[in-house]
Amino acid sequence: MRRVLIAAMLVPALAATAQRPIKVMLLFDMEGVTGATDFKHTSFAHPPEYATGRESLTADVNAAIAGLKAAGATEIIVVDGHGSGNTSGPDVIDDQLLPPAKMQYRSTPFDIYMDSYDHSVDAIVAIAMHAGAGNRQGFLSHTMTFEDVDYKVNGVPFNESMILAMGAARLKIPLVAVSGDDQLEKEVRRHLPWIQYATVKHAAGRAKAESVPRDEATRRIEAACRAGLAGISAARLPEFSAPFRFALTFQDEAQARIAALLPGAEQSGTTVQVRANDFEEGYRKGNQLIGLAGAIGRPAARQSVLNAQPNADVLSIAVTDWLYGRFLETVAPGKPGAPSAPARYWGAQ
């Protein structure tokens, strides 16, 4: 009898020891942060507001970590999916992350949606996400960039959560939980209805949002992540079928015209589309379109700001002189005063 009792006592301990480790990747953005109600909360260019946004982001991420841990996660890797302009560190406050979460650092750049996970990852959660391009009500809604006003795959509007889900589906890894505003919730319910969702604020338009109280946001995020991981056996993968047609509509015809220089691109007005046999190929081609459009869109924005300054003429001459200096090799090439390249990479930077 004594041997039987000892054996019975050992069974739970042995079962716990033998339990399979569960590894989760947690990707965060920032527009969907609970306390981000103005774009300045998401931008490193506005230090006071950004500091507030970082604190709220860290609270959201820690709520997700708590939920994942409660559901059995034994390893959690964290990836910065925002890129506020902060080149000294990730947007989350790294040293405040709850264990067992750890920020993912690499020595070379990597694509957050296609390269930030591998077959060792069992599930993915996406925290502080936002509605996609074309949603005129979502807070700071966009997909990948400011330059596009619509981002569609096979005619379906895509947001970044959907891109993440499709990328991970290549490795059969499910996206199990997402947090953000109520407009993103509608998009997720429409296209990925099996995913657990935590609504942390109401979008009062693209430029304003109203947050739920911190305690309630923490509860919702923790519950969604716990339920998402606990229900992983029933998790599904998105089922958008190949071939893929990525169609991006840009802000103006000039951006579209430059983007259409990509081999194989097709332009119609301000919309440029590319075709691909698999999702990753189409996604990377779409990023090339965005890069080309940005090459004209962002300089145009800088020129507009420059022209509005009272000393615009003096600044314009200084720019021209600098260009001549680079041409004559009297100034160093590259952007003056640019920060040195980071020694490590943690995602979008």
Image: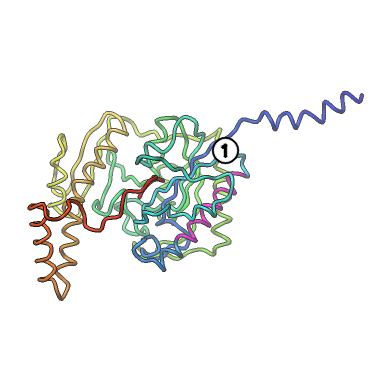
* Residue 89 spot, x, y in % from top left: 42, 53
| Quadrant showing the N terminus | top right
Residue count near mark 1 (Cα–Cα under 10 Å), binned few <14, some 14–19, many ≥20: some
Which of these two is toward me, 138 or 103? 103
Which residue is at the far bottom?
310
Which of these two is toward me, 333 or 261? 333
Q: Name the kind of residue labelled 1 in the image.
A: Gly
* Residue 254 spot, x, y in % from top left: 12, 52
**In this picture, residue 209 sits left or right of residue 145:** right
Tell me the element at label 1. Answer: loop
Which of these two is toward me, 166 or 305? 305
Residue at the (54%, 36%) spot, across then down: 23
Q: Which residues are magenta?
A: 54-69
Q: Which residue is mark 1?
A: 231
Figure check: 154 above or below 183: above
**In this picture, residue 142 sits left or right of residue 61:** left
**In this picture, residue 191 sits left or right of residue 244:** right
